[in-house]
Amino acid sequence: METAARRAYELDPESPAANLAMGAISDTLADALKYLRHAIDLDPSARTPYRLVGDELQDIDAEQAVAFFQKSLLLDPKEDASRAGWRARLACSAATRTPGTH
């Protein structure tokens, strides 16, 4: 997958799909977010990059992650897998919050 992702990006760095693939294979959070945010810039109507950014952020910034999950659902509210994952992530982040914090 890594070779295919790199080749797709090499052929068309302005392709949303190539940027998604590069985000998926990135070794660092910064690189993953760079590619995923570029995919969003290229196609703001696609739900997948928003969900993937949420996945990347969920352990370090739950509120930001939830915002990306919500955007993903707004773009495709019929997506059951996305909805189930978003609800699970919300429950997990709510369970780990300190009482009295937001």
Image (cartoon, rainbow, N blue to C red):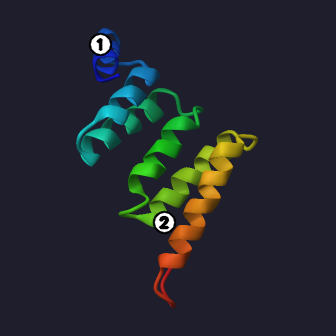
Q: Which residue is mark 2?
A: 63
| Image coordinates for residue 8, horizontal then vertical, percent | 35, 14
Residue at left offset 66%, top offset 44%: 81
- Horizontally, is 67 left or right of 53 in the view? right
| Image coordinates for residue 22, horizontal then vertical, percent | 33, 28
**Which element type, helix, strand or loop, lies under badge 1?**
helix
Amino acid type shown at disc 1: Arg
Residue at left offset 34%, top offset 43%: 33
State the image quarter where residue 59 is shown. bottom left
**Mark 1 / mark 2, whichever is N-terminal:** 1
Q: Which residue is mark 1?
A: 7
Amino acid type shown at disc 2: Glu
State the image quarter where residue 27 is shown. top left
Q: Are marks 1 and 2 in contact (CB under 8 Å)?
A: no
Report how far apart the C-alphas of labels 1 and 2 lie in the structure.
Answer: 34 Å
The label nearer to you, 1 versus 2, is: 1
Residue 44 marker: none
**Which element type, helix, strand or loop, lies under badge 2?**
helix
Q: Residue furthest top?
A: 11
Residue at left offset 54%, top offset 36%: 48
Viewer-nearest residue: 57 or 40? 57
Residue 15, compared with residue 36, is above or below; it is: above
State the image quarter where residue 46 is shown. top right
Residue 56, compared with residue 21, is above or below; it is: below
| Image coordinates for residue 1, horizontal then vertical, percent | 35, 22
Residue at left offset 59%, top offset 48%: 71
